[in-house]
Image: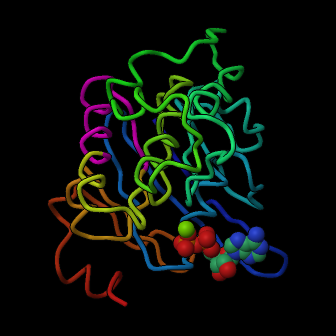
Amino acid sequence: MLRVEGLVQHYGESNILRGVTLEAREGRRLCLMGRNGVGKTTLLQCLMGLVPPSGGRVLYRGRDITRLAPERRARLGIGYVPQGRQIFPLLTVEENLRIGLPARRDGDRAVPESVFGYFPVLKDMLRRRGGDLSGGQQQQLAIARALALGPELLLLDEPTEGIQPNIVDEIVRAVAKLASELGMTVVHVEQKVPVARRAGDDYAIMERGSIVDSGGMGDLSEEKIRSFLSV
Ligand SMILES: Nc1ncnc2c1ncn2[C@@H]1O[C@H](COP(=O)(O)OP(=O)(O)O)[C@@H](O)[C@H]1O
Ligand SMILES: [Mg+2]
């Protein structure tokens, strides 16, 4: 579904991505793990087209999208939920959900009802301002906003960061349903190992700008966690 081949990226003189090679398979949830500052967010921004890579390729359904603008990627079915949620605090929940709709491929301008099946709490909050929601609700809103565009590949950057455990569970369950019911492919950046174990079918570990290990989640050993993820 998504293949990343030798992706390189620089911020000025700093080489942040040093040849990232990665595959996300259709209908599966890939957890991208790694310590702070290794380049996880930069990678997702490159996948969405928000940051230009200086080398390598991104293939989506076999098509080279390395140089495609973010709006074009959204139309091809790539959804992105940035780290820190970035909802619009002064807009209502409904306005937040509607804001990306012009990017929908099918021209539909209504928020699909199915979104509320995954995040029912939002249904009762449509008139509230985004900024008045709890952190966990804002995260659900941010994911729902991406879902409103009908993505087939969903990029989630630390969706459980700073969120209370019961909402983390709701988010993990909702994303699992997206994969199992809709066949959605998910790349989920996750720092917490216990959450990753539930949130990923597969894992990939990043260190200083490249992928150092990957496999099925069942193969993520304590030894690997100690060497690549412990602080
Ligand atoms: N806009 C930017 N300009 C310059 N350096 C940046 C920028 N964004 C991130 N970096 C640097 O790139 C590195 C990787 O950051 P990031 O991708 O956010 O890592 P992670 O998400 O794994 O914590 C860090 O050293 C960070 O300081
Ligand atoms: Mg990050």
Q: Quadrant of the N terminus?
A: top left
Q: On screen, 189 above or below 79?
A: below
70 or 163, which is in the foreground?
163
Region rendered in magenta: 171-187
In the picture provided, is 204 more to the left or to the right than 166?
Answer: right
Residue 208 percent location from the top left of the image: 55, 80
Magenta segment main secondary structure: helix
* Residue 18 in view (yes/no): no
Residue 102 percent location from the top left of the image: 71, 20
Residue 160 percent location from the top left of the image: 38, 59
* Residue 187 in view (yes/no): yes
78 or 205, which is in the foreground?
78
Residue 231 percent location from the top left of the image: 37, 90
> Which residue sits at x=69%, y=44%?
90
Q: Residue furthest bottom?
A: 231
- The quadrant holding residue 96 is top right
Quarter, ligand 1: bottom right
216 or 126, which is in the foreground?
126
